[in-house]
C-alpha cells in the first residue's frame, strides 16, 4: 500500500552535471521530516536527482509497455518514483525507481483490480508531452502524473507540479489533442 506523504517545500531546481536535480523536503503524515534517497542540502531538503522522464525511461527498460502513472513518493525512508506500467505482456506492473540514482528497486505484476486500471492504455499525447505542456503552463517540479479516463468524458493526463513560486498546481492535459496545452488550478 502506498504511503501518502505531503511535499512540504521545493527548495530549488538546479542544473548539475548536465542533468536536472530537484530539491524536495518531505514530511510524513505526522508532520515530521522523513529521510529519503539522495543527498541532503544545506537547508535539510533531500535531492531527487532523477526526473519523472528519467524514471519512466528506467521503468520501461525494466518492463516494456506504457506508463500510465508516475508518482514521487516516500518509501522505507527513501524518495522513489512509483510507476504503473501496462506491460507489453498485457499485465499491469508496479515498478519502483530510486529518485536519487535512477536504479529500478523493484517490479512486480499487480493483481489488484482497482478502479484506475480501466484507464486508456494508449493516447495521442504521451506522458512526456503531457509533462512538457504542464511545465510550460506552470514551471517547476513534477511530483505526479497520471492518465485518467472518465466515463463519458475524454481521457486526460493529470499532472501535479510544485511551482517555482512554491504553490501546488494541478493541471489537466487532453490526452488526445495534438499540440497539448495544460489547464489547471492552484491548491
Image (cartoon, helix red, strand yellow):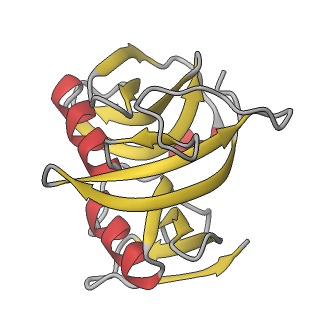
Quadrant of the drawing holding the N terminus: top right
Q: Picture quarter containing residue 86?
A: top left
Compared to residue 39, the image places residue 185 above or below, namely below
> Which residue is drawn at the image coordinates 33% and 60% (left, top)?
14
- 25 displayed left or right of 106: right
> Which residue is drawn at the image coordinates 37% and 14% (left, top)?
106
Can residue 110 be seen by looking at this rendering? yes
> Which residue is drawn at the image coordinates 73% and 71% (left, top)?
187
- 94 displayed left or right of 185: left
- 166 displayed left or right of 157: right
Residue 28: give x, y in percent of width and height: 75, 33
Residue 80: give x, y in percent of width and height: 46, 31
Can residue 92 be seen by looking at this rendering? no
Compared to residue 55, the image places residue 187 above or below, namely below
- 170 displayed left or right of 122: right
Residue 93: give x, y in percent of width and height: 39, 24
Compared to residue 1, the image places residue 19 above or below, namely below
Q: Which of 105 and 110 is in front in this view?
A: 105
> Which residue is drawn at the image coordinates 27% and 51% (left, top)?
53
Q: Which of 116 and 43 is in front in this view?
A: 43
Residue 122: give x, y in percent of width and height: 30, 54
Q: Nearer the viewer, residue 11 or 143?
A: 11
Amino acid at each position: 500500500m502506498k504511503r501518502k506523504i505531503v511535499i512540504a517545500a521545493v527548495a530549488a531546481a538546479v542544473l548539475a552535471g548536465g542533468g536536472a536535480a530537484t530539491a524536495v523536503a518531505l514530511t510524513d503524515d505526522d508532520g515530521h521530516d522523513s529521510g529519503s534517497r539522495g543527498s541532503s542540502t544545506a537547508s535539510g531538503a533531500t535531492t531527487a536527482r532523477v526526473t519523472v522522464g528519467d524514471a519512466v525511461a528506467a521503468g520501461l527498460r525494466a518492463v516494456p509497455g506504457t506508463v500510465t502513472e508516475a508518482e514521487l513518493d516516500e518509501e522505507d525512508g527513501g524518495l522513489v518514483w512509483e510507476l504503473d506500467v501496462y506491460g507489453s505482456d498485457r499485465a499491469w506492473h508496479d515498478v519502483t525507481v530510486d529518485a536519487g540514482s535512477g536504479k529500478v528497486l523493484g517490479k512486480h505484476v499487480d493483481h489488484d483490480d482497482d478502479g484506475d486500471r480501466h484507464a486508456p492504455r494508449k493516447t495521442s499525447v504521451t506522458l512526456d508531452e503531457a509533462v512538457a505542456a504542464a511545465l510550460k503552463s506552470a514551471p517547476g517540479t513534477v511530483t505526479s502524473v497520471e492518465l485518467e479516463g472518465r466515463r463519458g468524458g475524454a481521457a486526460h493526463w493529470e499532472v501535479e507540479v510544485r511551482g517555482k513560486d512554491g504553490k501546488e498546481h494541478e493541471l489537466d492535459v487532453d490526452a488526445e489533442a495534438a499540440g497539448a496545452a495544460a489547464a489547471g488550478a492552484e491548491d
